[in-house]
Image (cartoon, helix red, strand yellow):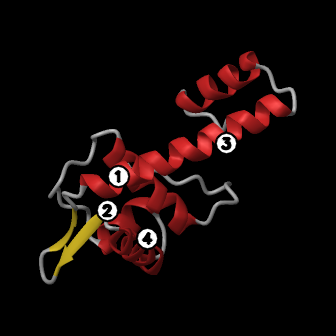
Amino acid sequence: MFTINYQSREPIYEQLYNNVIRLIGIGVLSPHEKLPTVRAMAQQLGINPNTVSKSYQMLEQSGYIYSTVGKGSFVADNSSVLNSHREETKKNLSKALKQASDVGITKEEVNAMMNDIYLGGDGK
């Protein structure tokens, strides 16, 4: 369920952060669902527990998860955070599409990039 690209230039803690947000956004992770412990996640992904801890702290600060002492970390039931993130993403996408149009990137090129991304590629 959680994946890391070790060849990516994106830091591992950011990949994990974005991965959890994506899984929440597409409904794979439900509100109040327990996340793996820091130690279990680190072991599963073969990464340092401090890296997982940093991602979990960022997710908690952003409102995507909450932690309960002695029980673990859980997906927050906070649809307003996700909706806010979606709206901001839509604005950024709209701005990027306008810029793409302004520099002559065709609709077909944009569609090809979009299809690649939705099929798991990097859109390049």
* Labels 3 and 4: the sequence-earlier one: 4
Circle on res. 95: 3
**Residue at the disc numbered 1:** 82
Residue occupying image coordinates x 58% and y 52%: 5
* Camera-side mark, 3 or 4: 3
Residue type pointed to by label 1: Leu
Give the Cα separation between the discs numbered 3 and 1.
Answer: 20 Å
* Camera-side mark, 2 or 3: 3
Give the Cα separation between the discs numbered 3 and 4.
Answer: 28 Å
Residue 60 x %, y %:
33, 72
Residue farthest along the right direction in this orientation: 103
Residue type pointed to by label 3: Lys
In which quadrant is the C terminus drawn? top right
Circle 2 SS class = loop
**Residue at the disc numbered 4:** 55
69 vs 110, nearest the viewer: 110
* Camera-side mark, 3 or 1: 3
Apparent side of residue 39 relative to residue 74 in the rendered image (left or right): right
* Camera-side mark, 2 or 4: 2
Give the Cα separation between the discs numbered 4 and 1.
Answer: 17 Å
Q: Is residue 23 above or below residue 60?
A: above
Circle 4 SS class = helix
Residue type pointed to by label 4: Ser
Q: Judge whether residue 124 can be spotted in this image.
A: no
Residue 91 x %, y %:
56, 45
Apparent side of residue 8 relative to residue 42 in the rendered image (left or right): right
**Residue at the disc numbered 2:** 64
* Labels 3 and 1: the sequence-earlier one: 1
Give the Cα separation between the discs numbered 2 and 4.
Answer: 11 Å
